[in-house]
Amino acid sequence: MKPARRELPELLTPVQVYTHLNNYVIGQERAKRIVAIAAYNHQKRILNKKAGQPNPIKKSNILLIGPTGCGKTHIARNLANVLDLPFAVVDATEYTEAGYYGKDVEVMVAELLFKTGGQVDETQRGVIFIDEVDKIARRTHGARTGAGARDIGGEGVQQALLKLLEGSEVFVPLNVTQHWSKHDFVLVDTSEILFICAGTFSDMPVIQQEHRPVGFRGKRADVQKRRRVTTKDLLEYGMLAEFLGRLPVVVELEPLSVDDLMQILKRPPDSILREYVHLLSLDGIQLRFTDTALKLVIEHAIGKNLGARGLRSIMEEVMHDIMFDAPTSRGKRITVDKRFVAKRLTRME
């Protein structure tokens, strides 16, 4: 007689995770679907281990590749929200190889531990987002990119991260502000921590250009859409094979279009426009933006290569005078049009 099959608790399906991400993340359809699948597999891995069974499911750590302001951090943050997991953002450039001046990689786990109020169990099921991971590439191709040679902040950090990404018990400092102190450590198992690494890999086209064919076929390739980044490209860039092996889910994000940026301003529940409309409504002011005004804001962000991240700083400048005078403008209806925006944007030139 076969043993009764154990029913797993209800998990968030890929469709449910995607639907949540879709409410807050505009565009990047392929990325949202891939991340949703990885999140579902991560849930199954955690539950399978809790059941005391052998766990053949490997960690679904993720590598996000895309230009500045395309939504890498935004996707990771909203993924942590929908999974109801503690979330920490760290910058790879702050860390050095063990034994050198700077932060050891265990400190990034300490950042997550701090977010959970020191609860080790909660920390061990959290999400760590490692930004600027392309900046810790092994720079043997420095002659090509002008980055020069380095180790303690490059290959050495990749080596140090291997044990965290794969999963191991590490001693984590309880006090993030005194991480250099060799006292007050706690043991944390990183086996179930989901790591999401991200980087722009801005030099990647240089790597890919070297592998393009020359002659007539090469010219045809130049006018075609840039091909997807391969493992070979990442190795040529300076990422270690062992490091990439612990990031099985690789997602490329596309630059956001004008329509995408317009939707980012308008659609999400936490959009910038909704925020300003709500803020001014508390002062009794009715605020409205024309589409031509918003397009001018978007064109300015694209022109400066700021992506979605730059929209807020631009809107802060546009709304500066209105927000300053808001308490004395009760009962007014304010329309922000193209001329109004153009005048304010001249201050940013």
Image (spheres, grey):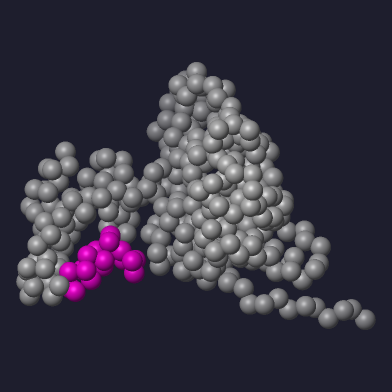
- Read off the magenta span: 265-282
| Residue 339 location (% of width, % of height) | 7, 52
Q: Tell me, yes or no, whether the highlighted magenta stretch contains residue 313.
A: no
Depicted 349 relative to depicted 340: above or below? above
| Residue 220 location (% of width, % of height) | 43, 30
Q: Which quadrant is home to the C terminus? A: top left
Name the residue nearer the viewer: 209 or 281.
281
Q: Is residue 242 visible?
A: yes
Q: Is residue 60 visible?
A: no
Residue under the point 31% across and 44% down: 306
Name the residue nearer the viewer: 10 or 84.
84
Q: Is residue 223 left or right of residue 136?
A: left
| Residue 201 location (% of width, % of height) | 48, 37
Residue under the point 69% across and 55% down: 187
Q: Is residue 96 left or right of residue 257?
A: right
Residue under the point 58% across and 72% down: 12
Residue under the point 57% across and 42% down: 180
Q: Quadrant of residue 264?
A: bottom left
Q: Is residue 298 left or right of residue 79?
A: left
Main SS category, magenta section: helix
